[in-house]
């Protein structure tokens, strides 16, 4: 947080660029970085590349989000997001670009993401509940937004180490 690149609107990929060796290697290094830090999603601007690429995968028993449900492995290029259910849901969010902090962010509970997959084919994914929040968080990175921008009640902004969540709040 504070690096101006994280505040830029990321550039889209050309079709032939997606399938290039360079981009395929970039995707692999995104997974490696995400796994190294125990994240569940990572966007290219977080590793210094202002391009529209994000990866998401929730493993069972992720140490940062132990309560989160498992997801498949998703690589997203040039996404468009559509809200399918505007009902707001609040989750404690964290971010590898904002280390050590968590805060409560409210976002729509169901979204559709249209994007290009790793073979540059058109794909679509519907995400609900916590996974919808994960997608919105990652796609925000491509717009130059961070979760801290969306915290309504700034008093929820907390150091992870200090955060003792009640059972009710322990959703993620
Ligand atoms: Zn993030």
Image (spheres, helix red, strand yellow):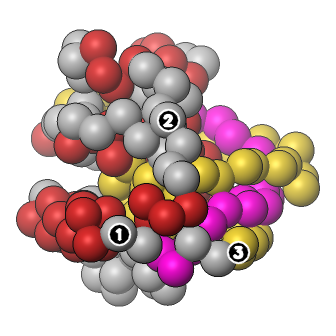
Q: Nearer the viewer, mark 3 or mark 1?
A: 1
Counting from the top left corner in percent of width and height, residue 4 is at 29, 14
Please say whether residue 117 is one of the residues in the magenta stretch: yes
Query: Residue 128 placed where, x, y %?
Result: 72, 66
Horizontal relation, residue 24 to residue 80: left or right: left
The relative height of residue 89 versus residue 101 in the rendered view (above or below) is below
Sequence-earlier tag: 3 or 1: 1
- The kind of secondary structure element at disc 2 is loop
The quadrant of the image that shows the C terminus is bottom left
Q: Is residue 40 left or right of residue 111?
A: left
Residue under circle 2? 11
Q: Residues in magenta?
A: 105-119
Corner quadrant of residue 86: top right
Give the labeled residue for mark 1: 20
Mark 3 residue crowding within 10 angstroms, few (<14) / some (14–19) / many (20+): some
In three-dimensional space, the C-alpha distance between marks 3 and 2, rounded to whole angstroms, equals 19 Å
Q: Are marks 3 and 1 in contact (CB under 8 Å)?
A: no
Q: Quadrant of the N terminus?
A: top left
Is 159 on the left-hand or right-hand side of 108? left
Where is residue 27 shown, x and y percent of the image? 30, 67
Q: Are marks 3 and 2 in contact (CB under 8 Å)?
A: no
Rounded to the nearest whole Å, what is the CA distance between mark 3 and mark 1? 19 Å
| Front residue of this view, candidates 119 and 106 | 119
Image coordinates of residue 160 in percent, x first then y, are: 21, 40
Marks 1 and 2, the one that precedes in the sequence: 2
Label 3 sits on residue: 123
Q: Badge 2, how many Cα within 10 Å: few under 14, some, many 20+?
A: some
Q: Is disc 1 placed on a helix, strand or loop?
A: loop
């Amino acid at each position: 947080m504070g690096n101006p690149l994280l505040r830029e609107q990321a550039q889209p990929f050309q079709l032939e660029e997606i399938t290039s060796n360079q981009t395929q290697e970039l995707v692999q290094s995104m997974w490696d970085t995400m796994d190294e830090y125990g994240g569940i999603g990572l966007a290219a601007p977080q590793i210094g590349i202002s391009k529209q690429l994000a990866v998401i995968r929730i493993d069972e028993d992720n140490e940062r989000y132990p309560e989160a449900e498992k997801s498949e492995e998703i690589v997203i290029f040039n996404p468009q997001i559509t809200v399918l259910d505007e009902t707001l849901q609040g989750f404690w969010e964290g971010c590898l670009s904002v280390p050590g902090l968590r805060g409560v962010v409210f976002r729509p509970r169901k979204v559709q993401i249209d994007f290009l997959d790793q073979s540059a084919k058109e794909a679509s994914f519907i995400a609900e509940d916590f996974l919808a929040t994960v997608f919105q968080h990652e796609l925000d990175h491509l717009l130059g937004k961070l979760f801290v921008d969306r915290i309504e009640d700034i008093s929820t902004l907390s150091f992870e180490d200090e955060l003792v969540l009640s059972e009710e709040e322990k959703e993620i």
